[in-house]
Image (tube, grey):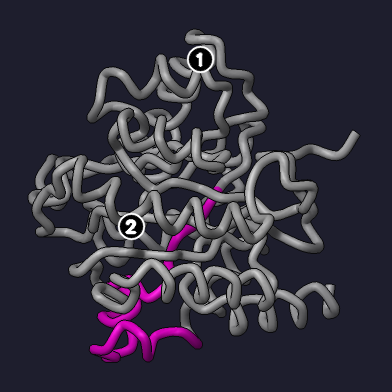
Amino acid sequence: MTARFAGLPLDRHRPLVMAIVNVTPDSFSDGGERLDPVQAIEDGLRFVEAGADILDIGGESTRPGSLPTSPEDELKRVLPVIEGLARQGIGKGKGRSLVLSIDTRRASVARAALDAGASIVNDVSALRDDAAMLPLVAERQADVVLMHRRGLPENTFAGPAYGDVVEDVRAFLLERAAACEAAGLPADRIALDPGLGFGKSVAQELELIAGAGRLAEAGYPVLIGCSRKSFIGKLTGIAKPADRDPASAWLAVEAVRRGAALVRVHNVVATRQALAVWAAMK
C-alpha cells in the first residue's frame, strides 16, 4: 500500500510541494504582498496550476525577531482565504488531490481553519505554544507538521549549542510525535520539519538538509522548508529573498534526494521544474 500524508501519496519520484501563501504584513520574503484576500486566493490558484499539492496559509509571521499577532487579527487574515479557496474546490472533501494547510500555533485559529476546509495544521512550535492544540488535532484527527524551533519567534536564536544537530532535532521531533500518538493521533497523520532558519547556524542548516534521511528513519515523512531562507543569502551574498529562488530550487532537489518527502516553497514553478529534471535523471 502506498504511504500517504493528508490523503496525498508519498512518491519518491514526485515529492509533495507545499506552496507558501502568507497573508501577513511582515513575513521575511513576501510580507504585504497578499493583504487583500482576493490576491491571496488568486496566488493560491496560480500555485495549484503550477503544480502545488498543498497550499499553506499563514496569518502570523514567524521570522526571527517578529512580534506576536493577536488571534483575532490572524483569523481575519486567513479565514477569507481558506474559505475562498474552498469555494474554488480546494480542500478536504472536494474530490481533488489538493490540500489546504493552516500555518498557526494557536488552537483557536486551527479550529476555525479546519472548519473552513483545511486538513493540515502546520505548527512551528510542534504543538507546544498552545496547550489546547494537541487535544484539538487529536480530536479532529487532523494531519500535522511538527517543527523544531528554539525559543519564540522574537528570540528564536536563543538557546545552548547543539551536540549533533541532526540527532538533537530528531530526538525532539520524535518526542513530539510520540506525544501526538499518545493523544490518539495516528502515525500516518504526522510529518516532521527540522525548522531551518529557527535557531540554527548556516552549517547546522546544511547538516539538517543532508541529514533528511536520518530524520525520516522512524517512518514519518520529512518536510524541508529552505525556500529563500537567510542562510542562502549568507552562502550566496544575495540580499533580496525573492532573488534566492534558483538556490532554493536546487536545495529542494537536494533535500528530496537526501530523503525529504515534502518541500515548502515560495516559487512553485522553479521547484517543480527542478524536481522534474531530477526525477528524469534518476
Residue 265: within the magenta? no
Residue 238: within the magenta? yes
Marks 2/1: CA distance? 36 Å
Q: Which residue is mark 1?
A: 139
Of 180 and 83, nearer the camera is 83
What residue do we see at 12% from left, 48% from top? 68
What residue do we see at 36% from left, 86% from top? 242
Residue 128 drawn above or below residue 39? above
- Residue 3 at x, y = what percent? 79, 37
Task: Tell me if residue 215 can be seen.
Answer: no
Q: Is residue 241 left or right of residue 42?
A: left
What residue do we see at 73% from left, 47% from top? 94
Q: Which residue is mark 2?
A: 204
Of 20 and 261, nearer the camera is 20
What residue do we see at 24% from left, 75% from top? 32
Residue 231 drawn above or below residue 233? above
- Residue 220 at x, y = what percent? 62, 34
Badge 2: how crowded within 10 Å, few (<14), some, or many (20+)?
Answer: some
Q: Which residues are magenta?
A: 223-246
Residue 23 drawn above or below residue 141? below
Tag on residue 102?
none
Task: Give the image quarter of residue 39.
Answer: bottom left
Q: Is residue 112 left or right of residue 35?
A: right
Farthest residue, direction right: 1
Q: Is residue 243 left or right of residue 3?
A: left
Task: Give the image quarter of residue 170.
Answer: top left
